[in-house]
Image: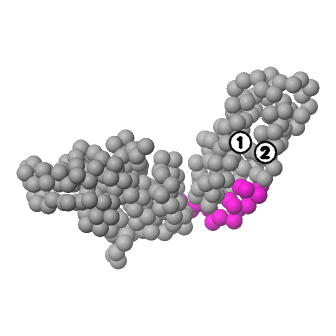
Amino acid sequence: MRKEEALALLNAIEDSSKKLHAEIRLVKAKNINRKTTKDSAAKICSIWFEQLEPSLAQFGVADEIRKKYDDLFTSLLQLAIRNSSKVTYLKVLEGTICDFKGDLFVTVMKSAGQTVSVTHLTKILESATAEEKDYLNEALGCASQKFFRASVVLGWCAAVHRIHRTVEKLGFDEFNKKSEEMKTAGGRFKRWNKSFTIQSISDLRLTVFDNDLLWVLEYWALIDGNQHERLSTCFTMRSNSAHPGEAPITEENLASFYSDLKAFVFDNPKFKLL
């Protein structure tokens, strides 16, 4: 999303919230029953959740600020789906309007804004852990400034972090067992001649190369052969990005990279940590 689009949506939300607040103040009844009023509240929430909020990270809006307004708009939506008290409506709207400009307008206005479309990266944030978000927020910042190679390196770090934690969850002994079994598996694994004795996450990080990790994941049935090939392409992109070379990373490459990481790692139920 371009900065101008984000600012326009912020203006629309603020203006609509102020109008709704003024309208509700004039209501003499204790409860808000009018359908048009409730529809107006629901529309404001729809703009926030569907159009604006998923893109705010690219403009440097902090997680706690996004959560603050997520909570406020969730409350407003809950009010809109039933007959709710006038006092509660006014309280939620006042909480929304009070610091809206300072919390959101200023941050978005000061940001450089996104110069490319990185929809898949912003979507990945929805299912990322706090540690992964450290990598992904930096990756998003790099992408927004067209530092595509840096973005790829950080994005791959986040994906490998998820994979490592999954191996830890499933058990290092099982990982070691799979690596040993592969030596006699044949087929796609006929050239495999390694085995590991991993005892900790540190061992995994320091002694297992990412390319080998992907082979074990396929044998373990955490990914299939096609997913393995696509993730190998992502890893190649990461390796190219981290070393000098003449192969540029384009916006299209970046979109494909994050699309695959989202589909095969972050949205893959086999890599779910909770």
Query: Is residue 252 visible to us here?
Result: no
Q: Quadrant of residue 33?
A: top right
Is residue 106 something one can see in this rendering? yes
Residue 127: mark in rendering: none
Q: Quadrant of residue 42?
A: top right
Which residue corresponds to the image point at 83% horizontal and 24% vertical from the top-left? 31
Q: Which image quarter is the C terminus in? A: top left
Q: Which stretch did the figure color magenta?
A: 101-116
| Residue type, numbered disc 2 | Gly
Under circle 2, the secondary element is helix
Q: Which residue is mark 1?
A: 72
Q: Residue furthest bottom?
A: 244
Task: Note whether 176 is above or below 71 in the view shown.
Answer: below
- How would you classify the magenta stretch by its main secondary structure? helix
Q: Are marks 2 and 1 in contact (CB under 8 Å)?
A: yes
Indicate whether residue 109 is drawn in magenta.
yes
Q: Position of residue 52 (x, y in %)?
A: 64, 47
Q: Residues within 10 Å of mark 2 (few under 14, many from 20)?
A: some
How far apart marks 2 and 1 lie (CA) works out to: 7 Å
**Residue type at the position of mark 1:** Leu
Residue 241 position within the rendered picture, expressed as x and y whole percent measured from the top left: 37, 69
